[in-house]
Amino acid sequence: MLKANIYVTLKNGVLDPQGEAVKKSLKVLDYGQVEEVRIGKFIEVWLEGDDRESALKELEEMSDKLLANPVIEDYRVEIVEVN
Amino acid sequence: MKFGVVVFPGSNCDADCYHVVKEVMNQQVEYIWHKENTVDGFDALILPGGFSYGDYLRTGSIARFSPIMPSVIDFADRGGLVIGICNGFQILLEAGLLPGAMLRNSSLKFICKSVYLKINRADTPFTNRLKVDHVIRIPIAHGEGNYFCDENTLQSLKDNGQILFSYCGADGEESPEFNPNGSLANIAGISNLKGNILGMMPHPERCSEEILGGRDGFYIFDSMINWLKEVGK
């Protein structure tokens, strides 16, 4: 069994209204040092098998097809656990 | 003409579209459940608004892989008329049938109100019963209608006349104050290069009869029917 963490983030230059709103809220809470907030997604996937290389390939394919939208998002896959 | 209204789990404007085509436009119409795998026999397809799959992951991202979608894509590739309204537009973007993606509204609010749209083209299957630079009034109802694409894509949309509808003021003014959701270039609706696929955030099916306070949406459906009659099936 393998476990992967997939981080989906908005590309540079893509406006993040959610991040903007959270930033404003942090300012209201007096965290004046906050300069920017951007919000992404964290996806955990558990996979059968223990071949990390082929799993990484599959996970990247999953990300390209469904988990991330290449028009607005970047992603990073890391395989974190092998049992 | 026979229209198909594709129904995904979570579609909620399917009955409105069906009603308009059948009762207002007096055309044949059938629902197509998303688990079907053919669209044979239809002259035009409507992907209605709603919240397919609860908008999970990204709007339209899961519906895009519904069993019906390969047939929809094939139908569109063969030149069939496909209109995606609101969530339907989001699904067309996710499916790659139209370029770009939707972001959350810049205000972070779900916006439900009537807006003005400027007609940029009147020689398309979806706008031939309208006039260039005319202003129509159609309701929007969405939380994620903030159209985004990269600079090159935006330029090619402009160069190729693919921006059919732009958000504007009552007199056609295209300024940021009349942009309800933050869309690039006030984009409310775009077509593909070939012109047979339209995605639009406003809901023409909600304003096709006077009893609903306006019938500007009628002309979009009427354009499709007119085009199918003129240009042939």
Image: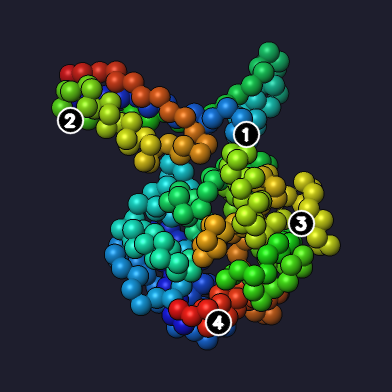
Residue position marked by numbered label 2 in the rendering: A48
Q: Amino acid at mark 3?
A: Cys
Residues under labels 3 and 2: Cα distance? 53 Å
Residues under labels 1 and 4: Cα distance? 43 Å
Instruction: Name the front one of labels 3 and 2.
Output: 3
- Determine whether A73 is above or below B232 in the image: above
The chain to which mark 1 is attached is A
Residue B122's spot in the image, x, y percent? 67, 69
Residues under labels 1 and 3: Cα distance? 22 Å
Q: Residues within 10 Å of mark 2 (few under 14, many from 20)?
A: few
Residues under labels 1 and 2: Cα distance? 37 Å
Can residue B72 be seen by looking at this rendering?
no
Q: Residue at x 53, y 72 (%)?
A: B16
Quadrant where the C terminus of chain A lies? top left
Residue A18 image-quadrant placement: top right
First in residue order: circle 3 vs circle 4: 3
Residue position marked by numbered label 4 in the rendering: B230
Residue position marked by numbered label 1 in the rendering: A15
Per the image, label 2 sits on a secondary structure element best described as loop
Q: Residues within 10 Å of mark 3 (few under 14, many from 20)?
A: many
Per the image, label 4 sits on a secondary structure element best described as helix
Q: Residues within 10 Å of mark 4 (few under 14, many from 20)?
A: few
Asked if labels 3 and 2 share a chain, the reply is no
Q: Amino acid at mark 2?
A: Glu
Asked if labels 1 and 2 share a chain, the reply is yes
Q: Residues within 10 Å of mark 1 (few under 14, many from 20)?
A: some
Q: Which mark is residue B168?
A: 3
Q: In front: B75, or B199?
A: B75
Quadrant where the N terminus of chain A lies? top left
Q: Are marks 1 and 3 in contact (CB under 8 Å)?
A: no
Residues under labels 4 and 2: Cα distance? 56 Å
Q: Is residue A71 left or right of residue B115?
A: left
